[in-house]
């Protein structure tokens, strides 16, 4: 199973900067990308084309969308369909990122519709889950992650190809704050995610990837990647520069 090293650029970068960053990243890792790593770039929609061009000939690189609306097409002003992402060369998409849950108010059910529909249309899906600081303090980690996964994965067919479903554990309190979950906290949460997947998908759950996200940096990436049940990282801030993300990718 290849580790999935994902760059979530959020709402950053105009086309030219996106192109230069992607080119810089390809150049920096082309001779050093370990065989067991896959690099995924999730740019803003307007930069998909530039990044696609930059990574076109780079083995081990993939393109993804940060979001979509779970419908084929229709009168959904401002939205984008999975087929439009596929048409741009995307093979992956995110659902349930905490910024969409907490800023845009997306509910678990809506996130679940995206996971199901994205898979149906042919995208590989990354379901993001994670607790807020208050939920953690109240001892509700398990309850929250279980609820987000139960609802988020409710429509996923039992025969889903395991490499097409990834769960990213991103504790909300560690996103963009400089605070990283410690090894013990990551191992505990990822063990929980794996066991929920096993309850739902049986042995196949062992072939699904679990990513950690939340203040991953070049300095902590190698330790995080060595932990049990960590099969990749989902990186925000430190993925914006080719220099720092290339160090994470090869950590
Ligand atoms: P940071 O790496 O900036 O904490 O963001 C994490 C994240 O939200 C990735 O999706």
Image (cartoon, grey):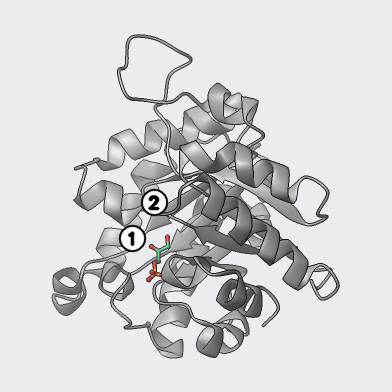
Q: Position of residue 65 (x, y in %)?
A: 51, 41
With 198 as the anchor, is 78 left or right in this view? left
Q: Quadrant of the C terminus?
A: bottom right
104 is higher (above) or lower (below) than 110: below
Is residue 124 visible in the rendered structure shown here? no
Contact? badges 2 and 1 (CB < 8 Å): yes
* Label 1 residue SS: helix
159 is higher (above) or lower (below) than 71: below
- Nearer to us in this view, 80 or 121: 80
Q: Position of residue 116 (x, y in %)?
A: 48, 32
Q: Position of residue 35 (x, y in %)?
A: 84, 68
* Label 2 residue SS: helix
- Nearer to us in this view, 18 or 138: 18
79 is higher (above) or lower (below) than 62: above
Q: Residues within 10 Å of mark 2 (few under 14, many from 20)?
A: many
With 39 as the anchor, is 128 left or right in this view? left
Tell me what residue is drawn at x 64 percent, y 80 percent. 247
The answer to which image quadrant residue 213 occupies is bottom left
Tell me what residue is drawn at x 58 percent, y 26 percent. 120
Q: Quadrant of the N terminus?
A: bottom right
Q: Which mark is residue 149?
A: 2
Q: Which mark is residue 145?
A: 1
């Amino acid at each position: 199973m290849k580790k999935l090293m994902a760059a979530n650029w959020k709402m950053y970068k105009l086309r030219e900067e996106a192109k230069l960053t992607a080119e810089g990243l390809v150049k920096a890792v082309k001779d050093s990308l370990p065989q067991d790593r896959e690099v995924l770039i999730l740019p803003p929609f307007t930069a998909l084309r530039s990044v696609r061009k930059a990574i076109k000939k780079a083995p081990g690189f993939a393109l993804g969308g940060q979001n979509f609306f779970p419908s084929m097409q229709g009168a959904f002003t401002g939205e984008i369909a999975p087929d439009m992402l596929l048409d741009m060369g995307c093979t992956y998409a995110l659902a349930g990122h905490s910024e969409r849950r907490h800023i845009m108010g997306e509910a678990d059910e809506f996130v679940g519709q995206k996971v199901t529909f994205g898979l149906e249309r042919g995208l590989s899906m990354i379901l993001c889950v994670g607790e807020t600081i208050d939920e953690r303090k109240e001892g509700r980690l398990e309850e929250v992650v279980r609820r987000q996964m139960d609802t988020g994965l409710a429509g996923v067919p039992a025969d889903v190809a395991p490499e097409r479903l990834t769960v990213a554990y991103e504790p909300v309190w560690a996103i963009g704050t400089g605070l990283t979950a410690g090894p013990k906290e990551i191992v505990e949460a990822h063990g929980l995610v794996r066991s929920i997947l096993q309850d739902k998908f049986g042995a196949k759950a062992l072939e699904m990837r679990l990513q950690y996200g939340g203040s991953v940096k070049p300095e902590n990436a190698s330790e995080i990647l060595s932990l049990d049940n960590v099969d990749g990282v989902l990186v925000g801030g430190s993925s914006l520069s080719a220099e720092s993300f290339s160090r994470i990718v090869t950590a």
